Image: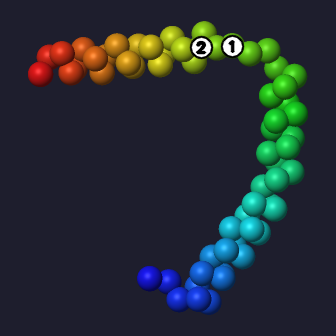
């Protein structure tokens, strides 16, 4: 179990990291809105992985 001062330091570090990363996240979201979406490049490998896992389950 963490003591009180360790919890405070951990919370302060989490807030610091959050504020440090916020400008980069905002810029990334702005860039992602300008790019065309390409869901096929995500869904095809994901579907292949799901089919492979189902194949492995069926082999047992």
Q: In which quarter of the image is the N terminus?
A: bottom left
* Residue in view at x 39 percent, y 19 percent: 49
Give x and y (percent) for residue 22.
82, 53
Crowd class of label 1 (few under 14; some 14 to 19; many from 20; radius 10 Å): few
Element class at badge 1: loop
Give x and y (percent) for residue 26.
85, 43
Q: Are the residues at dot 1 and dot 2 in contact (C-beta closer than 8 Å)?
A: yes
Q: Quadrant of the C terminus?
A: top left
Q: Is 11 displayed left or right of 60 in the figure?
A: right
The quarter holding residue 8 reads bottom right
Q: Which residue lies furthest to the left in this view?
A: 60
Give x and y (percent) for residue 17.
73, 64
Question: Is residue 5 positioned above or below 22 on the image?
Answer: below
Q: Is 28 displayed left or right of 52 in the figure?
A: right
Question: Is residue 57 positioned above or below 3 on the image?
Answer: above
The one nearer the camera, 5 or 35, is 5
Q: Mark 1 points at which residue?
A: 38
Q: Name the residue under label 2.
A: 41
* Residue in view at x 76 percent, y 69 percent: 16
* Residue in view at x 60 percent, y 10 percent: 40
Element class at badge 2: helix
Q: Is 2 displayed left or right of 28 in the figure?
A: left
The quarter holding residue 13 reads bottom right
Question: Is residue 14 positioned above or below 29 on the image?
Answer: below
């Amino acid at each position: 179990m963490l003591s009180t001062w360790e919890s405070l330091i951990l919370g302060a570090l989490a807030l610091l990291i959050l504020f440090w990363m916020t400008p980069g996240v905002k810029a990334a979201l702005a860039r992602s809105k300008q790019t065309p979406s390409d869901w096929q490049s995500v869904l095809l490998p994901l579907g292949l992985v799901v089919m492979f896992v189902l194949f492995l389950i069926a082999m047992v």
